Amino acid sequence: MTEPYAVPVPKGYRVGVWEVREPIATGAFGSVYAARRVGDTDRSAGDAAARREGRSRPRAGEPELPRTAALKFLPTGTATPRRLSHLRELIEREVELYRRLRHPRLVRMYETLTVDDPDRPELDGATVLVLERAQGSLSALLTAAPRPAAGPALLAQICEGLAQLHGAGWVHGDLKPANVLLMADDSVRLADFNMAAELEGTHAYTPAFSTPDYTPPELLWTEIGERGRRIRPSADVWAFGVLAHLVLTDSFPLPGATPTARRDAAAAYARGTDELRLSPELPDTWREIVRDCLTRTHADRIPSDDLLRRVEAAAGTGRSPRLPRRLLPRRRSRRTGILATALAVVAASVLGYGVSNWADAGGSGGESEKVTPASYGADELRTDKGIPAAYRRLIVDSAHDCVQPEVTPALIAALLKAESDFDPDLSDPAKDEYGIARWTPAVLRWWIRDDGVPAKETPSPPLSPSESIPAVGRYLCFIEPRLRDDLSGDRRVLLAAAYRTSYRKVNEAGGVPPANRVYATRVARFLKEYTPQDRDYTDRVAHYLEEYTPPRTG
C-alpha cells in the first residue's frame, strides 16, 4: 500500500513556469498540487518541458498569471482505467468550458499544459490544468459549521453561477458541495466542469457519471446512448434544491441513511408512491423554492433565471452578494483540516468519479433506516456466516460509497476476515500493522478521510473499525481501475491481493503473485461463504479456488 497519489509529482518539479509545492488531494485518475510561479529563465536541467495548450485572456490591467495556483495533473498520456474510456472526453469537456466561458461565479483556468518529460514516463504526456486558487469549499464549511449563518447569501451566489452557465448554453451536470469553492475574498465559485455539456436546443449529452444524492430521478436509470446521457438544465435545478435543503437544515430532502437508500427514495417519489417530506426546519420562503426545484418531472421545475430572482429575494441580497468576512475558520483541527488546505475542492473533478464521495460531508442523511444491524444489507451479505453485526453497517456502507461494482460488501467482509478474523484489537508491531484491517498507520493516513485529503497527523494505534473499514473501501476503489483488464482470476480476489501487496505487483504477475496465493485463496473462500447465493458467482469462485489451492502432497 504505497504511493497512494494517482499522479505522484515530487515537490519542486517544474512544468511550464510553475513549481509544484505541497500535495492537496488525489482521486482515481489524477492529483492536485499547490504551485507557485517561477521565472521562465529560472529552470534547472531537471525541469520538465511543457507544451502550452491554451491560456485565458487576462482582463485589462490584470497580471497574465498569478503568483500561486492549483495544478491538476491528469495522466492522459497513459492508458485510461478500466470502465473509464471517456476520461479524455471528461478532460476535454472541462477545458472547453474554461476556454469559452469567463464569468465571476465560475472558477478560472489560467492555462493548460502538457508535460513533455520522457525521463519520467509516469508524468510524460499528462495534461495539467492551471486553476485559480481557492480558500476552501462548501463541503468543508458544512463539515465545520452545519447550517452556516451565511447560508442564504452563499446559495444566492451559487444560483447566480448556475444562471450564468445556463445563460451561456451549458449544463453543469454535477453540482454538489464539493464543487462549490469559497475564495479568499469571500466570494463563491462553481468548479469541476468535466461533466458539463453544451446545450443543443433544450438538452445536452453528458457521460453517465454523477453523484446520486444530487441526481434527479429521471437520470438515475436513464438509457445511455452512444453520445452519453441526455441532460437538461433542470438537472442542475434539482441539484440546487438538494443543496439548498442541506445548507439550510443540515439534512437531505429525501430519507435514507445512505446514498443508495436516498436514491431509492427519489425513485419512489418520482413514481408517485411517496411524497416529498421537507424538513420542518426549512423556512417557509425557502420551502417553496426547494419544492419547486424538486418536482417529480423535469418539465415542472422552475427555470434557472426565475429561480435566481426568487433565491435573491429569499436571501435578502442584490446581485453578486458577498459572504460575511471570516466565513472560513482560521484554525485547523484534525476534523476540519480541509478548511486550511487551500484548493482541496479544486481537486473535486479528480475525486469526483472513480473514488468519488457519493455522500458529501455536511448532512445527517435524513431519517435512519429501520433495519437492525444483524440484517443490514442482507441481500448483499449473508447474515448466517459469523460476520459481527456491529460491523455490518460499516461494511455495507463502505462498499456502497464506491462506484466500482467489484467493491462489494462481501469482498470487504472477506478481506477483513482474512486480515484479522474481525479482531478490532489486532496488534502486529513487527509488521507495523494494527486493527481490523491490518492498516499501517502511515498508509491509513492517506485514506482515513472521505474527502481525499490526507489526515494532518498519522493515526496512532489502536485503530478503530469506524476509521479502518471505510478506508478499506476507499483504497479498494482506488485500486480497481489500476488493475489490468487481462489479469487472470476473480477480479475481487485480485483486489484483495493488491490490498495485501500492491496493484503494481499484481499487474506484473499477471494475477495473484505466488507469495500471496494462500492469502488469495482464503479471501476467495470467504467471498463464496459471505455472498448470497448466486450460482454464476459461486461457480466462478469455485473455479478460482481450484486453480489457486496448492496441491496436496504425499
Image (spheres, helix red, strand yellow):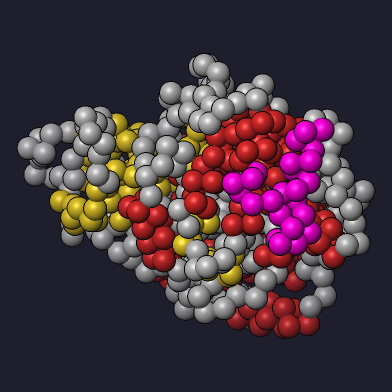
Question: Residue 44: horizontal and vertical position, in percent?
Answer: 10, 40
Question: Residue 380: horizontal and vertical position, in percent?
Answer: 79, 64
Left-right relation of 365 to 127: right
Left-right relation of 399 to 505: right
At x 41% / y 42%, what residue is drawn? 103
Which of 152 and 446 lies nearest the eye of the viewer? Answer: 152
Question: Residue 280: horizontal and vertical position, in percent?
Answer: 87, 34
Do we see residue 453 in this rendering?
A: no
Which of 302 and 515 lies nearest the eye of the viewer? Answer: 302
Which of 406 and 198 lies nearest the eye of the viewer? Answer: 198
Do we see residue 404 in this rendering?
A: yes
At x 27% / y 46%, what residue is drawn? 56
Q: What stretch is highlighted in magenta?
A: 284-307
| Total numbered circles | 0
* Image: 225 above or below 340: below
At x 45% / y 71%, what residue is drawn? 85
Image quadrant occupied by the C terminus: bottom right
Question: Residue 276: horizontal and vertical position, in percent?
Answer: 85, 50
